Image (cartoon, rainbow, N blue to C red):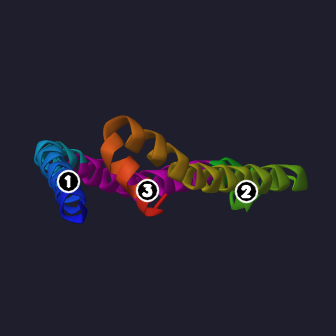
Amino acid sequence: MKEELLNKFLDKSLSYLESAEAFTKEQVPDYVAQLYKWFIINASIDLLTATVIPIVVLIIVYKIFKWTIRKDKKSGDYVVCSSDREGMLAAVASAGIVIFAILVIGGMSSLKKIIKITIAPKVYLVDYLRGKK
């Protein structure tokens, strides 16, 4: 009786292992393809975030401060801000642009998660199950 139960248990375990092996053989190539695709997209997003956003912010801040520099009509010298109001406006606008850029960079993790779910759902699921959200 015990041997029959043990044999039945071993047969079921063996059939589960065989089906798991078949499932793994079937799914691994697709998982690896999604993983490579995700690595490429993730690296591209990081590269764009690290290069494009700071360059755009620098250009905008430069144009804001260039707007505040004027040539004085009387002396011919360049004067920074013809009034305190323009200087304050330039500083606030620049700070706003920098804060906006920081928020955009901070929001990239959510964007990456959405892209990962869309492009590589199996990779996302495996990472989620491993606790690597």
| Residue depicted at 39% across the width and 48% down the height | 125
Q: Which mark is residue 8?
A: 1
Q: Is residue 27 visible?
A: yes
Q: Amino acid at mark 2?
A: Ala
Q: Amino acid at mark 1?
A: Lys
Q: Main secondary structure of the magenta part?
A: helix
Q: Are marks 2 and 3 in contact (CB under 8 Å)?
A: no
Could you say which is closer to the camera, residue 75 or residue 83? Answer: 83
Where are the magenta residues, as a range? 35-63
From the viewer's perspective, tell me whether residue 87 is left or right of residue 63: right
Q: Earlier in the sequence, mark 1 or mark 2?
A: 1
Q: Are marks 1 and 3 in contact (CB under 8 Å)?
A: no
Q: Is residue 82 visible?
A: no
Task: Give percent across and percent down for residue 8.
Answer: 20, 53
Could you say which is closer to the camera, residue 49 or residue 12? Answer: 12
Residue annotated with mark 2:
95
Crowding at mark 2 (Cα within 10 Å: few <14, some 14-19, many 20+): few
